[in-house]
Image (tube, rainbow, N blue to C red):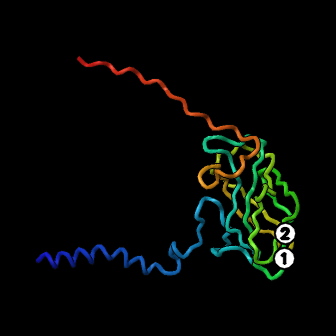
Amino acid sequence: MTSRRWIVVAAAFLAAPVLAGCGAGFDATTNKPYAPNEAGVLIDSGAYGKGDIHIPQAFVLGPDSGAQLPWRGSAPIYLNILNTAGAPDSLQAVTAPGMGTVKLASPIQLPSNQLVNTGKPTPQIMLEAIPKSFRGGESVKLDLQFANAGTISMNVPVVTRSREFAAYPAAPGATPAPSPTATPSAPAEESH
């Protein structure tokens, strides 16, 4: 076989996986909603949002990396909510079954087609009396009760206060992360 034929065969062999990916159809990973970070996104029955409520980012802010939120402590809940209905709505209450109580400063108004951040300038939703310590990576089920949209449930991750979340204010009562300490190494034996 000539070298030109080898090149054609090798190119066809290498192109096969790429071309096979084109036939992935409507269930391809690239056709599914995703979060660009570890915060949660409201996905209901494979669709982005539920009814007229879209939540592109939701998380419970945990401790700094390597630290923990203590048992019976509290943590802020951050939600970005978009109401796409033609009429305003409001978030009336939030519950976290089995994970403590949720304090909502006041009902959160959701104008039509305007993204609302519940954490700026200060968190308006706090998870209190947590029944276990959080280190980050846990998940909390929230039931969000809207005036018009009804109750929407979603699982929200507990994220550590690091990387893109490092600028957020620390959760109240978080224990500090242990500082790294140098350990003395054993002296190397001289070889004779």
Q: Residue at x 32, y 19 (%)?
A: 189
Q: In the image, is 94 to the left or to the right of 37?
A: right
Residue 16 occupies which quadrant of the picture?
A: bottom left
Residue 185, percent across and down? 43, 24
Residue highlighted by disc 1:
88
- Depicted 124 relative to depicted 132: above or below: below
At x 71%, y 72%, the residue is 54
Q: Which residue is painted at 81% across and 48% down in the image?
A: 128
The residue at 49%/26% (across/down) is 183
In the image, residue 108 sits, relative to residue 21, either above or below, namely: above
* Residue type beneath disc 1: Pro
Depth check: give the residue in front, 111 or 46. Answer: 111
Which of the image's four quarters has the N terminus? bottom left
Q: Which residue is mark 2?
A: 109
Residue 28, percent from left and from top: 50, 75
Kindly identify the amino acid type of the residue bearing the numbered disc 2. Answer: Gln
| The furthest residue to the bottom | 86
